[in-house]
Image (cartoon, helix red, strand yellow):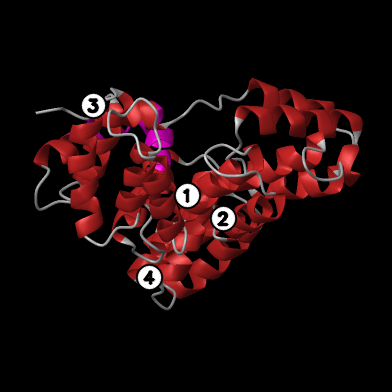
Amino acid sequence: MFYCGKMLIDGLGVKKDAQQGMIYILKAADAGFANAEYLASQAYYQGNGVTKSNTQGYNWLLKAALSGVSNAQYQLAQKMVIGDGCPVNYDRATYWFGRSIPAGHAVAFKKEFDKAEGTLYGSPYHANLKGLKYYSQKDFEQALKQFKIVEKAGIIEGKTMTAVIMANKDYSKYNLKKGVKLLKEAAKTDPMAMYLLGAMYEAGKGVEADLAQAKSYLEQAAKAGNPEAMCYLGNMYYEGRGVDKNYDEAVRYYIMSEGQLTPDAAKHLAACYENGYGNLEKDTQKAEELLKNSYKNTTEAVLKLVPMN
């Protein structure tokens, strides 16, 4: 199906017919063929053979990225930076840049970043990455300056990261009360802030432990598409931590993350496949694949390419 569609779209050996070609491409994409998912994303963004729809383009781009297409991962990150067919989300953009870099996109990323101003990587995303790098080096004052640029540009992650710094005991001007206040403000719209607050309420760190509040924030974050929150909730149900142990719910949240698992979540999901927990059919091969995959923090790969001048 895919190759028939590609021939029709490109006019290779047949009369060019992008509309008919896309019928085949979409059938292949619906069947989970990664290259078809990627081609469908490009078609919708460009309006080639289908009615132009950036939202549909983004949806297919995400599917292709999850299927492991590195070009899709890189482009998905670009779309998330500018909000093309999706909400602006610097946190997930950095995640997907990090996924694409080991697959050969380091040079492209560095080249674009070095151009900085006036490009995709100019302020405020440029400032956000520099802020993250300063934060990783515990240069909190410099990090705050960068995150203020992000916040002034109307990007909520700037406030979230400012809150994180304020609540960090290593910061010389540590102010937990202010950090929690800012985090609650950011959590009105930022999935990452929702997740962080949920984790704080569950663990009783910085706030009084409150499982109802924890679940509320974590569920909001998961609903908003935050994979860390999905994995956190999955772990709570898998371990019976603050909730009744429920493998069905654990598996539901792990599957919801669509492969964007944390290390603990991957181990738990592997155990579910191995033992048939959560109504999963026993699948030792799937369990082994989950354990073999790398679940490193992809942000590190991105920050290595960020100059500090």
User: What kind of element bears circle 3?
Assistant: loop
Q: Are marks 1 and 4 in contact (CB under 8 Å)?
A: no
Mark number, residue 192: 1
Q: Is residue 159 left or right of residue 256?
A: left
- Give the magenta range: 95-110
The location of residue 74, given as percent across then percent down, is 36, 43
Mark number, residue 221: 2
Answer with mark 3 or mark 1, whichever residue precedes in sequence: 3
Q: Nearer the viewer, mark 3 or mark 1?
A: 3
Mark number, residue 48: 4
The part of the image, by quadrant, that contains residue 299 is: top left
The three-letter code of the residue at mark 1 reads: Met
Residue under label 3: 139
Q: Are marks 3 and 1 in contact (CB under 8 Å)?
A: no
Q: Are marks 2 and 4 in contact (CB under 8 Å)?
A: no
Q: Give neighbour class at mark 2: few <14, some 14-19, many 20+ (Cα, 10 Å).
A: many
User: What kind of element bears circle 2?
Assistant: helix
**Whether residue 291 is situated above or below residue 236 in the rendered picture:** above
**Whether residue 144 is situated above or below residue 9 in the rendered picture:** above
Between the C-alphas of marks 3 and 1, the distance is 22 Å
Between the C-alphas of marks 1 and 2, the distance is 7 Å
Q: Quadrant of the N terminus?
A: bottom right
Q: Is residue 269 left or right of residue 18?
A: right
Between the C-alphas of marks 2 and 3, the distance is 28 Å
Answer with mark 1 or mark 2, whichever residue precedes in sequence: 1
Q: Are marks 4 and 3 in contact (CB under 8 Å)?
A: no
Q: Nearer the viewer, mark 2 or mark 4?
A: 2
